[in-house]
Image (cartoon, helix red, strand yellow):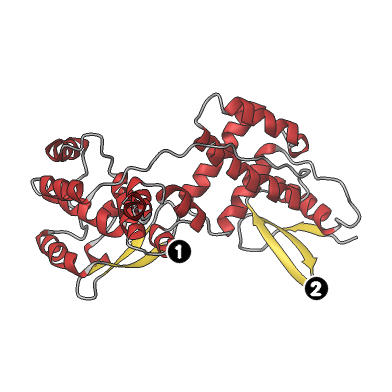
Amino acid sequence: MRKAWVFKQKNRSGWFVGWYEGGNRHAKALPTKVLAEHYRNLKYVQLNSDVFTGTIEVGWTELIAEYVRFKQLQGLADASIAEIKRTLNHFYRITKVRSSKRLNQSLANNFVLARQKEVRRDTLNKDIRNLNSFFLWASRNRYATEVKLRELKTSLKPVRSLSPLEIRSLIKAAKTEPTIYIRVVFALITGLRRGDIEKLLVSDVDVESGYVVTFSKKTGKSLNRPLPSTSLPYIKKHIDSVPGPKLFDDYFTSKKWNRVRRKAKLESLKFHDLRKTFSSVLLQRGVSTAVVQTLLEHSTPNLTHRVYANVDPVLKSAIELIPANDWLE
């Protein structure tokens, strides 16, 4: 039987669990002796999984803490981890699960039935994806038996994308609000989310080379993003007028945004629609889904194709390829 043990190191806070695996010694630091003893028991069963064939019962709180740590070690962004925590909190609220022993297909199905009365299907599908990743991790680590949920079918609405006339109208209206104007320009030429635009620094923009260094809070990805050469004079003019290190020295307010929308006669326009317009224009002009996926920082090309290619201008461009004139003459 392979063993795991608890020990304390001199001049270091906390407790440690040690074990041998693959001929090498490993150790894990934990803040308290109680947690260290708990982890030692888990590691003991895992090391001797060829002897112990059943699942390991773990309290819900300890299970979630271990899963969150696993995701942190994977390098997952804080925003994504927060979303996972919300899903698991809803699962606990609805199912009242107390330990890993109670995780089973029936409990997961009951969660879906109850949760779909509270949220839309696309939101529920996010919960299902988060839970499937959690269940897979739990089964691989012998905390629970295998559980798998299927995503619900959803009907995708056409994505809002601005026409060239609407874009010109919006930019003309935004010129009366200079900082809104440059935000709109950045959204249309980079596809960045507004939150990521707000965080940009002057030092992130290299006008000479035509690049901007961006970091996505949602995905944790950074990208050296090229800028259209025709936009550089306008960006440089704005940078020259900025006194501080931030690209924007004011706040984006709904009052300013509403004034711009009214002037452009686009009252229902959302700022996020500019990101969708960015992807739509690229796809219409023959840019591959893989390239658009990289620029939008999506995890899979399927998301880019399924959601952002579902726009009226893209569909219209495709339909225009049908030689209806030859048929109807």
Q: Quadrant of residue 108?
A: top right
Q: Quadrant of residue 15?
A: bottom right
The residue at which mark 1 appears reads as 290
- Residue 30 coordinates in the image, percent (x, y): 65, 53
- Residue 145 coordinates in the image, percent (x, y): 78, 43
The kind of secondary structure element at disc 1 is helix
Q: Amino acid at mark 2?
A: Gly
Q: Few, some or many C-alpha atoms within 10 Å of disc 1 (few <14, some 14-19, many ≥20)?
A: some
Residue at the image position 75 percent from the left and 41 percent from the top: 58
Which is nearer the eye, 37 or 295?
295
Q: Few, some or many C-alpha atoms within 10 Å of disc 2 (few <14, some 14-19, many ≥20)?
A: few
Relative to 191, 101 lies left or right: right
Which is nearer the eye, 286 or 92?
286
Tell how many labels.
2
Whether 104 is drawn above or below 279: the answer is above
The residue at which mark 2 appears reads as 23
